[in-house]
Amino acid sequence: MIENFKAIQAVIGEIKGAMVKLLENNETSTIFLNNSGLTEEEIVELLEALGKGNVSIEFKEGDQPVSWYETDYRGVWAGVYRNQQDAAFLYTIEIAYYPEVAGANAYDIAESINDIGDLAEATTL
């Protein structure tokens, strides 16, 4: 049972500050909860307090799948990174319009341009 919520309050303050940076400077932030000084029990308590919104994202490429959900606070995403055995090993809070790792990068877009060109050619037959 958590008796002192000061560590959780500190992380909430960090989240609030990061939200201001996102709004004012378009600057994204990531808080690695495993490295924040919170205990596992405090991490669970924080995630429960932040709640779950309506948007979730799953990234399954590679051997370490990641899932995010937007919390009840817009722009605040909770991330869970899993290993090959599906055990969670990293928890993050990302303050962003969407989690950056989930977004397409330039290489993927360039590859998709070629692929969609191939699709366009195939549909002309």
Image (cartoon, rainbow, N blue to C red):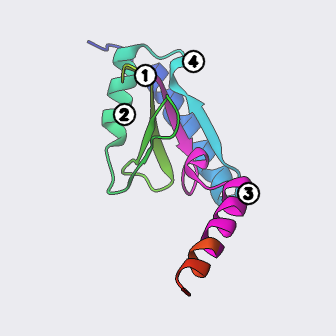
Mark 4–mark 2 contact, CB under 8 Å? no
Task: Looking at the image, tell me whether mark 4 or mark 2 is earlier in sequence order.
Answer: 4
The amino acid sitting under disc 4 is Asn
Give left or right: position of 78 versus 119. Answer: left
Q: Amino acid at mark 3?
A: Ala
Residue 73 in picture, x, y percent from top left: 42, 52
Residues drawn in magenta: 89-117
How far across and down, in percent of the image, does residue 37 sit?
A: 53, 15
- Residue 84 marker: 1
Q: Secondary structure at mark 4?
A: helix
Q: Which mark is residue 106?
A: 3
Disc on res. 47: 2
Q: What whole-number distance in Å separates the C-alpha atoms at marks 4 and 2?
A: 15 Å
Sequence order check: which comes first, mark 3 or mark 2? Answer: 2
Number of numbered tags placed on the structure image: 4
**Residue 2 rendering spot, x and y as whole percentages:** 31, 14
Quadrant of res 31: top right
Name the disc covering residue 35, or none: 4
Quarter of the image where the C terminus is located:
bottom right
Position of 102 relative to 61 (above/below): below
Q: Earlier in the sequence, mark 4 or mark 1?
A: 4
| Of the pair 85 and 115, the residue shown nearer to us | 115
Amino acid type at circle 1 is: Gln
